[in-house]
């Protein structure tokens, strides 16, 4: 079904039985994704979610950096969770696999771009139809977020995490942005416009994330956080 077909279908008149039947089956499908996710991921132990662009090539500096971060995290006893696709996600799973660490992939079914990468442990590979279910899994089972340069999806995951921490809907956990050259423009806008000009956030909200450039700095940010705070479940 094309985008135009979906648009036209949304405005077609439907009777109540059609609506009820469609919505009821959708609810069961959503529930099934939650149940499968909880059952598979409940036993994985401490993990860090790594985010970044699906379009980053294997010879790019950010791909290599993501791979290095994953290796260093697994050597510290953390598993790695990614979105399961190519690019930075593949780098994270590849780094975890290289050191024998847990390599988790939460793949999303898309009409383009996304197929799961070959570095995920097969018993830890999941495929989702719903982004919001997948988001819960990233948050619920991760003790930290490492965010490398990416596009809209990466920013979506980043601000979802910051919002939930800010509103205290989840326990605080480290959010580490990697690559100051990429993130500086966004961070400056947050400081100058959101905070100083519009006063839409509090100054303390700037402490919810850190910006680093190296793999050692990223891993140390995770380790140092848990030296100061008691580890608590995210939900």
Image (spheres, rainbow, N blue to C red):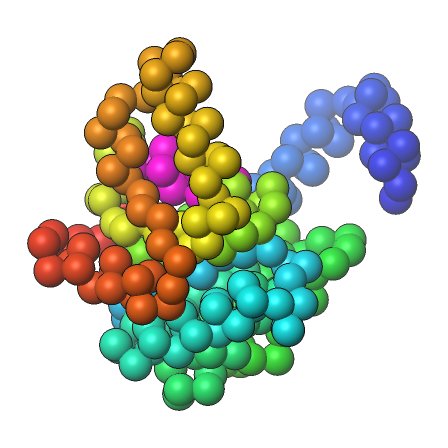
The quarter holding residue 63 reads: bottom right
Say if residue 102 shows up in the picture.
no
Q: 36 or 235, which is in the foreground?
A: 235
- The residue furthest front is 181
The quarter holding residue 87 reads: bottom right
Q: 42 or 64, which is in the foreground?
A: 64
- The residue furthest top is 198
Q: 187 or 19, which is in the foreground?
A: 187
Query: Magenta region's main secondary structure?
Result: helix
Q: Is residue 82 above or below residue 200?
A: below
Q: Position of residue 19 (x, y in %)?
A: 70, 29
Q: Residue at x 23, y 44 (%)?
A: 172
Question: Is residue 81 on the magenta stretch?
Answer: no
Q: Position of residue 11 (x, y in %)?
A: 82, 21
Q: How many marks?
A: 0
Say if residue 118 shows up in the picture.
yes
Q: Residue at x 57, y 50 (%)?
A: 150
Q: Residue at x 88, y 44 (%)?
A: 1
What residue span does the magenta drawing correspond to? 156-165
Q: Is residue 117 above or below residue 2?
A: below
Q: Residue at x 52, y 47 (%)?
A: 182
Q: Position of residue 80 (x, y in %)?
A: 40, 69
Q: Position of residue 90 (x, y in %)?
A: 57, 71
């Amino acid at each position: 079904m094309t985008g135009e077909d979906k648009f036209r279908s949304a405005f077609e008149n439907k009777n109540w039985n059609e609506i009820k039947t469609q919505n009821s089956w959708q609810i069961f499908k959503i529930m099934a994704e939650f149940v499968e996710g909880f059952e598979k991921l409940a036993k994985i132990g401490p993990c860090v979610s790594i985010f970044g662009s699906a379009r980053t090539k294997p010879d790019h500096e950010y791909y290599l950096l993501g791979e290095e971060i994953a290796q260093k995290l697994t050597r510290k006893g953390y598993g790695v969770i990614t979105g399961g696709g190519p690019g930075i996600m593949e780098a994270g799973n590849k780094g975890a696999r290289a050191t024998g660490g847990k390599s988790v992939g939460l793949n999303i079914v898309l009409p383009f771009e996304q197929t799961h990468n070959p570095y995920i442990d097969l018993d830890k590979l999941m495929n989702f139809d719903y982004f919001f279910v997948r988001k819960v899994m990233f948050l619920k089972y991760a003790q930290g977020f490492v965010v490398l340069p990416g596009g809209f999806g990466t920013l979506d995951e980043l601000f979802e995490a910051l919002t939930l921490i800010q509103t205290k809907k989840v326990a605080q956990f480290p959010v580490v942005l990697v690559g100051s050259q990429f993130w500086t423009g966004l961070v400056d806008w947050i400081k100058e416009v959101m905070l100083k000009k519009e006063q839409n956030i509090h100054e303390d909200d700037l402490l919810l994330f850190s910006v680093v450039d190296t793999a050692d700095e990223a891993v140390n940010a995770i380790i140092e956080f848990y030296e100061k705070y008691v580890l608590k479940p995210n939900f």
